[in-house]
Image: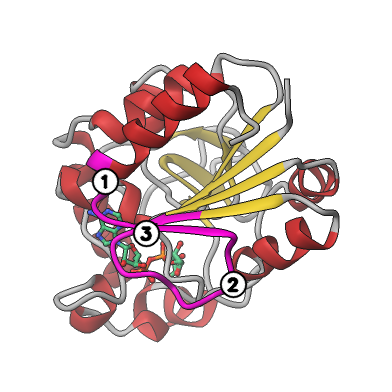
Amino acid sequence: MERVVILSGAGLSAEQGLGTFRDKDGLWTRYDLEEVATPQGFARNPALVHGFYNARRANMRGAVPGDAHRALARLSTHGGVTLVTQNVDDLLERAGARNVIHMHGELSQALCHACGHRWQAPDEMSPEDLCPACAKPATRPDVVWFGEIPYHMDRIEDALAAADLFVSIGTSGTVYPAAGFVDMARHVGARTVELTLEPSGAIFDDVRPGPASETVPAWVEEVLSHGLGK
Ligand code: APR
């Protein structure tokens, strides 16, 4: 079985109502990311940041996985497939995917920035919450903010170094290190495919514009019927 690394971004979950960041009416057109997605913003106003993620968590918990999530979940049961996502939603897991690598963390998790304890996030988090392990009022959403180090980079770099095929789904390719993964894959001789609504403009061997609900199931079907080599 060939080894494939699949990177997804907000476009994978856009049709499920979770929105994107940089499209028109995207999250960063409505919120100032400095205020709600940086450690400095959190330090300045933790209630505002908790409110932002509480709303996104509620939106996520009200959403359902789509055909693209289910197709990736089906593919993920085959050996040699590594699912990496920039998304903090749990739609891939709820579609049945296993071992999803969330490089920007997960909305469903809470983190204590005093002791490092992680637990299932409640629907609503607030600055007054106490860490269930150390009892300090030091809880935050377990998501990676701008200026912080993405999670699991060692596992991601190992997978990219051995990839035969790299597929980028629903990401604008504007935020590093994820934006550089296609170059890392090409550097080791992997073939590269982009499945996104508006092509990012990065160099891929195969670019298939369109909604994830159509392009992803079609690509997975092609791969499963003809082998990953296509
Ligand atoms: N199907 C497929 N792709 C889509 C769809 C869709 N229905 N709708 C939008 N897209 C594509 C857009 O064309 C765009 O390329 O999804 C991409 C969304 O880009 P962004 O909004 O920049 O989201 P993303 O690339 O995931 O952002 C990366 O930036 O703000 C940080 O941490 C945040 O993980 C996020 C990172």
Residue 146 versus residue 14: which sits nearer the camera? 14
Residue 100 placement (x, y as % from top left): 56, 32
Q: For the residues marked 2 and 1, what is the alpha-carbon distance in whole angstroms?
A: 34 Å
Q: Residue at x 33, y 48 (%)?
A: 12
Q: For the residues marked 3 and 2, what is the alpha-carbon distance in whole angstroms?
A: 44 Å
Question: Is ligand 1 less than 8 Å from the beta carbon at label 1?
Answer: no
From this view, report whether residue 216 is shown above or below residue 10.
above
Task: Identify the residue under disc 2.
Answer: 203
From this view, report whether residue 103 is shown above or below residue 187.
above
Residue 167 placement (x, y as % from top left): 55, 48
Q: Are marks 3 and 1 in contact (CB under 8 Å)?
A: no
Q: Amino acid at mark 3?
A: Pro
The circle drawn on residue 57 is 1
Q: Which residues are magenta?
A: 194-214
Q: Residue at x 37, y 59 (%)?
A: 127
Tell me which numbered mark, 3 or 2, is placed earlier along the sequence: 3
Q: Residue at x 80, y 51 (%)?
A: 157
Question: Does 103 lie within the magenta span?
Answer: no
Tell me which numbered mark, 2 or 1, is placed earlier along the sequence: 1
Mark 2 lies on a secondary structure that is: loop
Q: Amino acid at mark 1?
A: Arg
Q: For the residues marked 3 and 1, what is the alpha-carbon distance in whole angstroms?
A: 16 Å
Front position among marks 3 and 1: 1
Residue 126 appears in view: no
Question: Does 197 lie within the magenta span?
Answer: yes
Q: Amino acid at mark 2?
A: Ile
Residue 2 versus residue 66: which sits nearer the camera? 2
Q: Are marks 2 and 1 in contact (CB under 8 Å)?
A: no
Left or right relative to 203: residue 20: left
Left or right relative to 178: residue 17: left
